[in-house]
């Protein structure tokens, strides 16, 4: 027998429970279908940061922002391009208008959120916010979830520490402020042990809160329930076919279906087609990010675009471990990145999306995948490296496997890495000259607020620039990894999925990395993926529930 709900959501990542809360607030029934055994998607395993312009927390703290400033910023950072229909100005304006309203709605539903004290926007553009527009979850006791606790996808940080606190821990040996933060975190952990709590942070806390609210609100959530087909009747999406315990069943959706099933970062076939030269082995997302719902959208006539774009995130591949992000590592002083010949070709700090794209572009003319992160002994003493604490002692397997290379001189290091010794030495000497003059003439590293934030505030005169002049020297290979893809189904300002001719596929909505991102080719700030995921889910559910008036049925689409 067929089942019927008002709204069906495919996937349980960022935004799915938000859509469910909107539907339940409107008195509608809603079903979330998750193909894996865990709730929360990539969002739960992430930092859980949302980029929300002109938000309530900025206003409460007296931090200047406005609709107009956010528009100016996205106009400059994202821009208008024929091949980014997901980021047309109408969608950017809709996002800027609706994101703060989405946030207010979540707070009204009892979701406890806060502003990160500092996370500058990624680009030096008119309208940028240096304090930042990043919003995160408060710590959340996941034991409140009862039997659902074991079904929530684990987070990346198993400590009761806010993100801004965790960011200070690498400075334990250098500042008393970091030591105080550590004592505060240890105090929480001890308190949790005695009170029976288990406070989670970051994306796990965000999705834990959302899961609790959705369940309390009456949403139904089913795990191990992959959607095999979207049902279309008379040109309208009316439901889905689901596989559960080896049996197929149909579930009808009176008001619509929302696709929020992630991107295709773990699908090598799709990578080879759309982002050639990249590997699933470099991705930091869960194994379920396989893109079948994007392909299902295409099967029923949907337009796709921006498929070559990714949420790039530079990684290293430690022996026996998973890809480890090194954006913060390579943005610190006393470090540069060079290609396999030893030539510096890119700004080491700044937006991860731009760095990874730049590495792939460089590889077209010179071997640059992987590239080399080169550091000196000053760096080793002061900064974390690939998840290890500061200091010269590193795991022996790092050296045995040649994951970490060492040379007493730059020439020796170059030989160990297969680089041209003369080119590496010239690159380092040129960079050192820039450091001494206080300006990176080649790639302008250290000229933005975001560069400074990523660097070392205690290193003066520049948080970003420091010489490489103290041996021994070290190097490790860096790859253009990602935290999912940024291309997919093309949607309009109501999150409705469009056909190539611009007409609406009635009854079908989409959000998240299943769609062509409103950020286009960039990530405007921390949370430039999760913020839009929640917001477009909110917009979709409100439209489907009848709270938002319809827009013209046909818009321009350029794939």
Image (cartoon, rainbow, N blue to C red):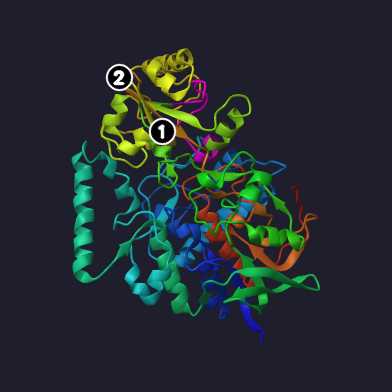
Q: Residue furthest front?
A: 400
Q: Is residue 232 left or right of residue 122?
A: right
Q: Along the horizontal axis of the image, is 378 left or right of 434?
A: left
Residue found 30% across the figure and 20% down from its top? 471
Question: Where is mark 2, residue-wise?
Answer: 470
Q: Which residues are magenta?
A: 337-355
255 on left or right of 208: right
SS state under label 2: loop
437 w.r.t. 450: above or below? above
Residue at position x 44%, y 78% in the image: 216
Secondary structure category for the residue under label 1: helix
In depth, the one of 313 and 126 nearer the eye is 313
Residue 275 in the image, given as x and y percentages of width and height: 64, 43
Where residue 505 appears, as percent x and y from the top left, is 74, 65
Asked if residue 364 is among those painted magenta in the image, a careful observer would answer no
The residue drawn where x is 42% and y is 39% is 326
Q: Nearer the viewer, residue 442 or 320?
A: 320
| Residue 349 within the segment the image draws in magenta | yes
Q: Which mark is residue 330?
A: 1
Residue 125 visible in the current orientation: no
Residue 19 at what x, y percent from top left?
55, 69
* Residue 394 against residue 69 in the figure, above or below: above
**Place of residue 94 in the rendered image (x, y in percent of width and height, measured from the top left):** 61, 56
User: Vertical placement of 229 versus 269: above or below?
Assistant: below
The residues bearing labels 2 and 1 have C-alpha atoms spaced at a distance of 17 Å
Q: Main secondary structure of the magenta part?
A: loop
Specify few, some or many for label 2: CA neighbours under 10 Å numbering under 14, 14-19, or 20 or more.
Answer: some
* Pointer 2 or 1: first along the chain: 1
Please tell me in which quadrant of the rendered image residue 475 appears: top left
Residue 39 versus residue 443 in the image, above or below: below
Res 48 visible = yes
């Amino acid at each position: 027998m067929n089942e019927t709900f008002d709204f069906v959501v495919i996937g349980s990542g960022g935004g799915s429970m938000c859509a469910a809360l909107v539907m339940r607030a409107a008195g509608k029934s809603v079903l979330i279908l998750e193909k894996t055994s865990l709730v929360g998607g990539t969002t739960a395993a992430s930092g859980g940061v949302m980029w929300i312009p002109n938000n309530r927390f900025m206003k409460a703290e007296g931090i200047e922002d406005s609709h107009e400033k956010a528009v100016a910023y996205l106009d400059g950072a994202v821009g208008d391009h024929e091949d980014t229909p997901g980021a047309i100005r109408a969608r950017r304006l809709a996002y800027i208008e609706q994101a703060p309203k989405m946030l207010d709605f979540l707070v009204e539903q009892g979701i406890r959120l806060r502003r990160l004290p500092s996370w500058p926007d990624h680009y030096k553009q008119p309208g940028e916010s240096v304090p930042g527009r990043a919003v995160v979850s408060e710590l959340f006791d996941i034991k409140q979830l009862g039997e659902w606790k074991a079904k929530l996808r684990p987070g990346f940080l198993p400590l009761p520490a806010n993100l801004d606190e965790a960011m200070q821990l690498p400075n334990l040996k250098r500042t008393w402020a970091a030591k105080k933060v550590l004592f505060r975190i240890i105090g929480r952990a001890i308190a949790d042990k005695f009170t029976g709590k288990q406070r989670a942070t970051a994306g796990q806390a965000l999705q834990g809160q959302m899961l609790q609210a959705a369940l309390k609100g009456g949403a139904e959530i089913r795990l191990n329930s992959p959607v095999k087909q979207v049902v279309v009747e008379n040109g309208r999406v009316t439901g889905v076919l689901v596989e559960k315990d080896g049996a197929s069943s149909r579930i009808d959706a009176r008001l619509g279906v929302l696709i929020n099933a992630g991107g295709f970062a773990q699908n090598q076939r799709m990578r080879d087609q759309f982002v050639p030269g990249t590997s699933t082995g470099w991705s930091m997302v869960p194994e379920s990010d396989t893109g079948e719902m994007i392909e299902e959208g295409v099967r029923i006539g949907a337009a796709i675009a921006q498929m070559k774009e990714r949420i790039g995130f530079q990684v290293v591949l430690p022996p026996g471990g998973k890809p480890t992000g090194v954006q913060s590592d390579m943005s610190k002083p006393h470090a540069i990145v060079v290609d396999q010949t030893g030539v510096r070709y890119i700004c080491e700090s700044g937006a991860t999306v731009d760095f990874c794209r730049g590495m792939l572009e460089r590889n077209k003319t010179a071997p640059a995948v992987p590239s080399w992160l080169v550091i000196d002994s000053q760096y080793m003493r002061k900064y974390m490296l690939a998840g290890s604490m500061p200091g010269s002692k590193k795991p022996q397997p790092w050296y045995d496997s040649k994951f970490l290379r060492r040379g007493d001189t730059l020439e020796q290091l170059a030989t160990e890495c297969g680089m041209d010794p003369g080119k590496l030495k010239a690159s380092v000497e040129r960079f050192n000259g820039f450091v001494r003059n206080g300006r990176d003439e080649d790639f302008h590293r250290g000229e933005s607020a975001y560069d400074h934030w990523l660097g070392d505030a205690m290193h003066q005169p520049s948080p970003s620039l420091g010489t490489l002049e103290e041996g021994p020297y070290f190097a490790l290979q860096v790859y253009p990894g990602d935290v999912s893809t940024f291309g997919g189904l093309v949607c309009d300002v109501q999150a409705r999925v469009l056909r190539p001719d611009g007409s609406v596929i009635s009854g079908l909505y989409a959000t998240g990395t299943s769609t062509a991102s409103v950020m286009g080719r960039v990530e405007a700030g921390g949370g430039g993926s999760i913020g839009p995921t929640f917001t477009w889910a909110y917009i979709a559910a409100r439209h489907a529930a009848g709270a938002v008036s319809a827009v013209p049925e046909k818009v321009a689409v350029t794939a």
